[in-house]
Image (tube, rainbow, N blue to C red):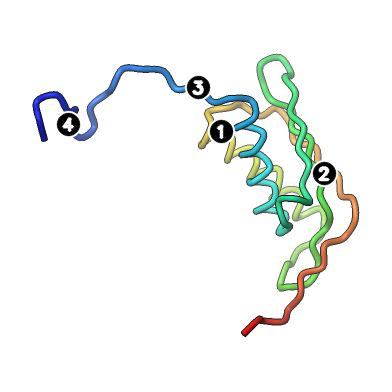
Amino acid sequence: MSATEPGPGAVVPGVTRISARAVERLATYLAREAGHVPAGQVAVRLADAAGALTVAVTLPVAVGGGVTGTVAERSTALRSRVTTGLRDLAGRTVGSVDVRYAGVHRISGRRVR
């Protein structure tokens, strides 16, 4: 380590900015992951509600492939994943997550060899 490199745990001055598009893509990824569907089947809209984000997610219901739980249980898990993910990864406060299911995504149980 040279004299100009900060040591481990040192604070380096500067600013980190996360664009609205990056937050939207992050929310899409989190919803896709929690909903067990491809990213192309997830739509996310973000809005500001008095300093907190309102997130609207539209995706199909995943069936098959070992996905378990009722739609209500999966919705709760998706809301939690998006809320905590945006807080932990982007430092954003989420006021609400609205989940709308549109269609069905069938997950095949077959394995490709």
Whichever of callouts 4 and 3 sits on the residue coming sooner in the sequence is 4
Indicate the amino acid at tag 4.
Gly
Q: Secondary structure at mark 4?
A: loop
Whichever of callouts 3 and 1 sits on the residue coming sooner in the sequence is 3
Report whether 53 appears left or right of 91: right
Q: CA distance from mark 3 to mark 2?
A: 27 Å
The label number, if any, that marks residue 58 in the structure image: 2
Whichever of callouts 1 and 2 sits on the residue coming sooner in the sequence is 2
The label number, if any, that marks residue 87 in the structure image: 1
Asked if disc 4 and disc 1 are in contact, CB closer than 8 Å, the reply is no
Q: CA distance from mark 2 to mark 4?
A: 45 Å
Q: Name which residue lies at 61% across and 39% down.
A: 26
Q: Secondary structure at mark 3?
A: loop
Q: Which residue is mark 4?
A: 7
Q: Name which residue lies at 90% across and 56% down.
A: 103
The label number, if any, that marks residue 17 in the structure image: 3
Determine the image quadrant of residue 16: top left
Q: Secondary structure at mark 2?
A: strand
Report whether 2 appears left or right of 97: left
Indicate the amino acid at tag 2.
Thr
Q: Nearer the viewer, residue 13 or 77?
A: 13
Q: Position of residue 105 (x, y in %)?
A: 82, 62
The nearer-to-camera label among 3 and 2 is 3
Q: Secondary structure at mark 1?
A: helix
Asked if disc 1 and disc 2 are in contact, CB closer than 8 Å, the reply is no
Q: Position of residue 10 (x, y in %)?
A: 23, 27
